[in-house]
Amino acid sequence: MQIFFNRDKFHKIKNLKKLDFFCKLFEQNIINYNISNNFFVKDISSPNYLRDNSIIFIKDDKFFKKFDSKNLCLISDNQDLINNNLTNNFFYVKNIDQSYNDFANYIFSHDDSIDYEDKFEKINNSLVSKYSNIHPSSILGNNCVVGKGVTIGKNCIIKNNVTIKNSIINDDVIICENSSIGTSGFGFDLKNMGAKFISPQLGIVYIDSNVHIGALCTIDRAKIDITYIGKNSMIDNHVHIAHNVIIGNNACIAAQSGISGSVKIGKNLISGGQSGYAGHITVGDNVVVAAKSGVTKNIPNNTTVAGFPAIDIKLWKRNIIKNKKNGYK
């Protein structure tokens, strides 16, 4: 999903830095490095969105073949990847997560507090950032919050008590009461559960045109790039969509469903109520997920699944019949 956005609208980059500055920033974490003196850091990249003059953090060498730009500085704790480095600039570090946090915390203003470096005005008893852009044809309800950098397109309806931050909303979108769009995802370090170690989120939410989002929904901003909801999709009430999720066009997701981080879903999904999706899986096109299913692995195109863990619905039905014959209710 190649949608580029101007991160500077949401996070003012404090100042450009040469790479020798990051030697000091990563000092406690560096094993080895090679840097050039004429490289200035402007942004952060991911394997999906390569930006010139940026730092990219990669753990897995399966992404490495995707880039060979001299305009990137690679940071990794994978020695094989560093040894095969195609860029002139790299940092080989002990802990890539800590390096990312050090970088993000320094180079960006990313505080989630409502008033960070922002100025608000009241419209319909709602707080609207002066740095946002709402098309005049759109309707904003009462007690909403629209944060810095947010864009809301034509003919949108934002109902009462909705919070929108770090988001781009395309045309003809309806967001119902008490939903929250663009707040930080559930990023934390599993290795250091005893410490408060929240991973900074620097991405956005992109909601494409003609999408309906029900009441009391939450859609988290991406870590670096975008969380995306495709065109003509219908999201029921009480649905949670985590950071980095990509949902294709024409999705229909029923109430009380939860989609974990970095899930990629194709077009024409039909997902029953109270279904759940494990993180980092891929769901193909034209998939139907029965209510209360738990999707724990990749689902191919044109498949209907049910149960926990979710399996082909024909097999699931046979298992139900077999269990009944064996006396299970």
Image: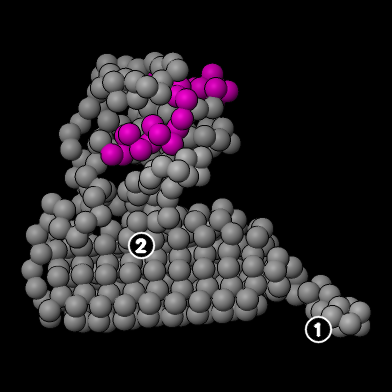
**Label 2 vs label 1, nearer the camera:** 1
Mark 2: secondary structure: strand
Q: Residue at x 40, y 74 (%)?
A: 217
Asked if residue 95 is among those painted magenta in the image, a careful observer would answer yes
Instruction: Return the disc, 2 or 1, that comes first in the chain's sequence.
Output: 2
Out of 80 and 197, give the one closest to the viewer.
Answer: 197
Q: Amino acid at mark 2?
A: Tyr
Q: Residue at x 86, y 78 (%)?
A: 323
Asked if residue 232 is among those painted magenta in the image, a careful observer would answer no
Residue annotated with mark 1: 329
Residue annotated with mark 2: 206
Q: Position of residue 44 (x, y in %)?
A: 34, 38
Position of 15 compared to 62: left or right?
A: left
Out of 42 and 201, give the one closest to the viewer.
Answer: 201
Residue 138 visible to the viewer: no
**Residue 205 drawn above or below residue 156:** above
**Residue 22 drawn above or below residue 129:** above
**Residue 21 drawn above or below residue 297:** above
**Residue 97 drawn above or below residue 162:** above
Position of 159 compared to 206: left or right?
A: left
Mark 1: secondary structure: loop
Residue 25 visible to the viewer: yes
Q: Tell me the quadrant of the picture where the C terminus can be found.
A: bottom right
- Number of residue marks: 2
Q: Which residues lie in the magenta part?
A: 79-105
Q: Amino acid at mark 1?
A: Lys
Out of 68 and 39, give the one closest to the viewer.
Answer: 39
Q: Position of residue 249 (x, y in %)?
A: 48, 70
